[in-house]
Amino acid sequence: MTIETKPTLLVLLGPTAVGKTKMSIEIAKRYGCEIISGDSMQVYRQMDIGTAKISKEEMEGIPHHLIDIHDPDDPYSVAEFQEQCRRLIGEIHHRGKVPFIVGGTGLYIESVCYGFEFTNVGADEEFRNEQFAYAESHGADALHDRLKFVDPISAERLHANDQRRIVRALEIYHLTNTTLSAQMATQTKESPYDLCIIGLTMDRQMLYKRIEARIDQMIEQGLLEEVKSLIQNGYEPGLISLQGLGYKEIISYLQEELTWEDTITLLKRDTRRFAKRQLSWFRHMKDIVWVDVTDVENFTENFARICDIIAGKFLSDIEYISKQSN
């Protein structure tokens, strides 16, 4: 009788600006990986600067998947991400490569790692429209407060600007009298994969400095012009994609709701808060082996530590796959 082995899956996650991109390329080159983006915003075309999307040059020839696959007016969901990842993981293995998810969208990555089942609890369009209308008249924070009241755990994980997911969490509670966080807690945590999940972390104040420097760089690269172009191309400011971090703040400036100085201040503050929520989500995940990369100047040593973790988890399997692909 043969024992069926689980497919290998390598994962690198961490908060925004922690250094995942550079590290992921070196890992992919070392172990013969194809990278699957675990970022819910990098799926959108024409949204490059604000999502810190990896460039063709930065990819260094490593295949990347689930980038630039949707137009901004074509919403993307965690269920779609999960379905596409399952297919890609099988295809990448078939090519003799190692599937490697890299990103910072916790729910998306966790849904794949542990095979979450997304039950269809139905919809109530009238209730949904009422919530969006409430947000329109009272503000995003007021809608977020509604979620805090019924489901504080989900509210902690969702930004006030993420109205689609906030409304869906409220709708689930409205229809089932059970919170989204309670339903998430009942999900089985057994993985269909042989997992190695590595998390990058660093000193909080240093991370915040890197976040602010990244935003300054985005502005220099033309974030304002990117958002103007999206609007000029007919994409409505209310789209889910344009409610994303970096885009909503710039739109508020274009609509003369904020000064330029206040826009930059708000964007930096919101991004710091986003990083905190990412870390909060990751703390609830299991199986993550954390690597502190505060000493960013010592990249070689940090990379070596990560290679040791991979070796300790499934070196023989991954070496075999790598040799087969050479």
Image (cartoon, rainbow, N blue to C red):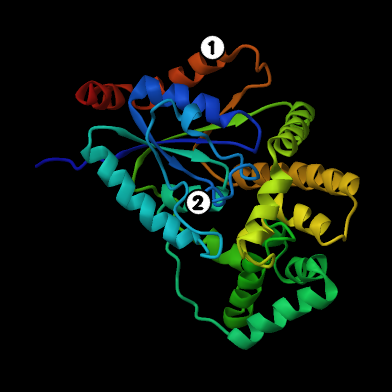
Q: Are marks 2 and 1 in contact (CB under 8 Å)?
A: no
Count how many numbered circles sit on residues in the image. 2
- Pick the residue in front: 73 or 153: 73
Q: Quadrant of the C terminus?
A: top left
What is the spatial separation of the Cα atoms under label 2 and label 1, in whole angstroms?
30 Å
Asked which quadrant contains residue 316, the reply is: top left
Residue at (77, 73) in percent of width and height: 135
Disc 2 is placed on an element classified as: loop
Where residue 92 appears, x then y in whole percent? Answer: 28, 40
The amino acid type, in three-letter code, at marker 2 is Val
Q: Residues within 10 Å of mark 1 (few under 14, many from 20)?
A: few
Q: Which residue is mark 2?
A: 43
Q: Residues within 10 Å of mark 2 (few under 14, many from 20)?
A: many
Q: Which residue is mark 1?
A: 300
In the figure, is residue 234 to the left or right of 7? right
Task: In the rendered view, tell whether residue 286 sits above or below residue 231.
Answer: above
- Pick the residue in front: 139 or 232: 232
- Pick the residue in front: 169 or 150: 169
Residue at (59, 36) in percent of width and height: 14
The amino acid type, in three-letter code, at marker 1 is Thr
Asked which quadrant contains residue 258, the reply is: bottom right
Q: Nearer the viewer, mark 2 or mark 1?
A: 2
In the figure, is residue 10 to the left or right of 217? left
Circle nearer the N terminus (2, 1)? 2
Where residue 308 appears, x then y in whole percent? Answer: 44, 17
Where residue 43 appears, x then y in whole percent? Answer: 50, 51
Task: Work out whether residue 276 can be spotted.
Answer: yes
Task: Work out whether residue 116 can be spotted.
Answer: no
Q: Quadrant of the N terminus?
A: top left
